[in-house]
Image (spheres, grey):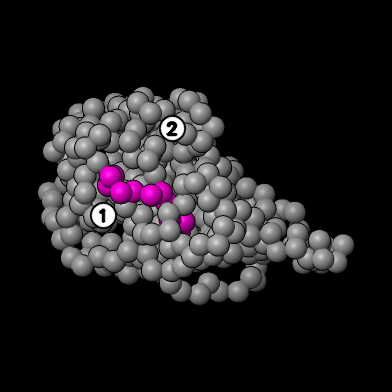
Amino acid sequence: MSSAVYINKFSVACALGESNDLVRRNLLSKTPTTVAGLVSSLDGRAVPFGKLPFELSGSGGGARSRTNRLADHCLRPLAPAIAEYISKVGAQQIAVVVGTSTSGISEAEDALKTRLQTGQWPASYHLMTQELGDTAAHVAQRAGAGGPVYGISTACTSGAKAIASAARLIKAGFCKAAIAGGVDTFCNLTLNGFAALESLSDRVCNPFSRNRRGINIGEGGALFLLSSEPSTIRLAGWGESADAYHISAPDPKGVGAEDAMRLALTSAKISASEIGYLNLHGTATKLNDSMEARAASRVFGAKLACSSTKPMTGHMLGAAGACEAAFAIMALEDQMLPAHLWDGERDVELPPLRFAEAGETAQARLAMSCSYAFGGNNIALVLARA
């Protein structure tokens, strides 16, 4: 249980680009841009949307859903490294843990429309398409992995929890390596669900501003190859909590979020002062930003450079924690901080935080990425530059 866990390779795709190189360039740009897509909600609004800026390949090979096709896209750059691990340790020693909150719900929406119109389900539709473990099973089949395989669906913490879960499998000796991360694509159920909760903004999201109006939906995916084989990036620690304050609203005091951050620091055997960058969950909803500012301020004070990257990507839901872990790694590798894009109008009711500016550099060895979800489900990951 004592061996370190390293990230040997990772791949991310989102509104910032289709590859690590493009995502890195746009994420760390001195002139970063916000989400540019639009999508219509049932309440008649055209709202900003972090759509993938590229087309996904076709549905061959069992990729029944758009989510699975995005998982394929993220898996391809990892394929040579995965094949090498399989040749060394065997397929049974490779686990897969993937988080998602949508899976094939969009395809289920289309299939249901057909059934309501014709009385029959489309011949091509299968119920497994919308099972929340389908993407993990698909990734395992695609990668040739024969170890433990399961999906995680804890709303907006899914992708980050998948990474921590995979690390536990490695530490416990259930596998030698694991493919882990999160993938989510657009569906109307999610879009209109947030609209019904009055949490969907009709403008680009504005995290921690007094003018914040809610989230933008986004889509994306990130997959990681983890093992105990040393690499340049180490998963130094993680912390998880479940305060169960409310089915959708966070604990206004941020007690569970604070617990997750402090547990992550303890797991990594470091102090708060050693963290060089904090990736905030930063949804730009009234309640999330309020509780998160309080929790982050209690743990780190007002001097640590931090940012929410969601104005650049939209909220990628089950993929957010995985993609933002990739962003934190990029910040460590390039020693540049993702900018916090907002209108600069501080909410005086919130404790002040020190938001990173575009083009800002930092000599950071450790970064923390936080994700919070419905039901008071919280996680913080600590990434280290080896």
Check disc 2 and report its element: helix, strand or loop: loop
Magenta residues, as a range? 208-218
Q: Is residue 60 left or right of residue 243?
A: right
Q: Main secondary structure of the magenta part?
A: loop
Quarter of the image containing the N terminus? top left
Residue 153 higher or lower than 29, as above or below: above
**Callout 2 environment at 10 Å: few (<14), some (14 to 19), or many (20+)?**
many
Residue highlighted by disc 1: 342
**Where is mark 2, residue-wise?**
250
Neighbourhood count class around disc 1 (C-alpha, 10 Å): few under 14, some 14–19, many 20 upward:
many
Distance (Cα) linking label 2 and label 1: 22 Å
- Mark 1 residue element: loop
Q: Is residue 76 left or right of residue 295?
A: right
Residue 42 x/y as whole percent: 59, 59
Amino acid marked by disc 1: Trp
Residue 142 versus residue 295 in the image, above or below: below
